[in-house]
Image: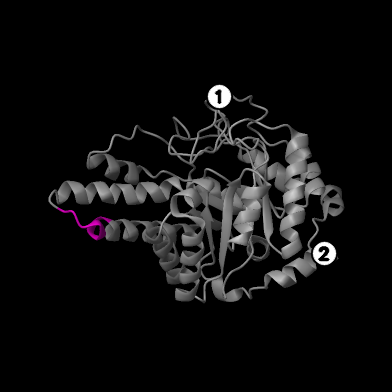
Amino acid sequence: MARITLRQLLDHAAERGYGVPAFNINNMEQGLAIMEAAASVNAPVIIQASRGARSYAGDIMLAKMIDALEEMHPQIPLCLHQDHGNDEATCATAIKYGFTSVMMDGSLKADAKTPADYGYNVDITRRVVEMAHWIGASVEGELGVLGSLELGCGEQEDGHGVEGEVSHDQLLTDPEQAVDFVRATRVDALAIAMGTSHGAYKFTRKPDGEILAMHVVEEIHRRLPDIHLVMHGSSSVPQVMQDLFNSFGGEMPQTWGVPIEEIVRGIRHGVRKVNIDTDCRLAMAAMFRKVATENRSEFDPRKFLKPAMDALRDLCRERFEQFGAAGNAPKIKVVPLAEMARRYRSGALDPRIGEMTEAA
């Protein structure tokens, strides 16, 4: 079995200074393309499923599909991660269906659109951590609300995302509060708010320090050098993809994503997991449009899906290489869930907060 927990994978990434792209999937074709890319460069992989994806494909189908991908690529360590879990039940059922990692996003209430207060976030995240660690699964928490510093709002995606205007303070994770949050919850990874958002329309101009607060990443890493940080909403929305999409009938307004060089900067300062979804959708959708335009009589879905899968594979391979994950798969010895659970219970995997704050 090549199934790995997020904690073990990110521990390895931290030891060797690389980042791992986390790709969202909804169907078989996406899974095949992502795993083909990982196998081609010997990279470990994080495959994510949102609540929307679980509703679309069904838990049983997703679980069996991941089993098949593992069997096809047994040499590739694969973490199956619940993206943006909104309550304990969402996280518990994910673990039931074979997810080795869950995100408890307590920055929003269970409706996944209303900002929650700090106490709520700590309490619900801690409960999910206790549940998941009991069987060895990992937990990612979130502190701060994901959204645009430029526009002062968030973006809904798959039914998740803050609604309405959000204050500047809410859109930036407080580094001092981050220390307290990790101490109180014992999360394995921390998603932080620093100006990125869901979807394609992240920035109306190339982002600078005013709208993409990489200094927040750097300060949190200074205070918590051993905690694995997560960048959400980190698709780069490359211009070449926008142009291709629009050249075949699309109407995507000019937009800017997170530059690769800024993601690499984050990796140098403790970012170990980088969430990418929009780029994957755009790569495939551009090819759907191309085939439909150039072959107007075509009706075989495979003729649309095969070029789309190739485009997704190439994109994912590029991200594995850019983030330094390529070549690391054979260096990882996967630890079973039962052993991870034993380590959690012994305290061996507890965050070393005292040492961190003293070092800061």
User: Percent from the top left, x then y, of residue 231?
Assistant: 59, 46
Residue 220's quadrant in the figure? top right
Where 100 falls versus 268 (above or below)? below
Q: Name the one closer to the observer, 298 or 190.
A: 298
Under mark 2, the amino acid is Arg
Residue 320 shows in this picture = no
User: Percent from the top left, x then y, of residue 328?
Assistant: 56, 70
Q: What's the residue at 42%, 48% (across, down)?
A: 279
Residue 146's quadrant in the figure? top right
**SS of the residue under disc 2:** helix
Q: Name the one closer to the observer, 192 or 84.
A: 84
Question: How dense is the environment of label 2, judged by Cα within 10 Å: few (below 14), some, or many (20 and up)?
Answer: some
Q: Which residue is mark 2?
A: 345
Q: Of marks 2 and 1, which one's residue comes earlier in the chain?
A: 1
Q: Which residue is mark 1?
A: 164
**SS of the residue under disc 1:** loop
Whole-angstrom CA distance, mark 2 to mark 1, is 41 Å
Where 239 falls versus 323 (above or below)? above
Residue sticking out furthest to the left? 297
Asked if residue 299 lies in the magenta stretch, the reply is yes
The residues colored magenta run 298-304
User: Percent from the top left, x then y, of residue 316?
Assistant: 43, 58
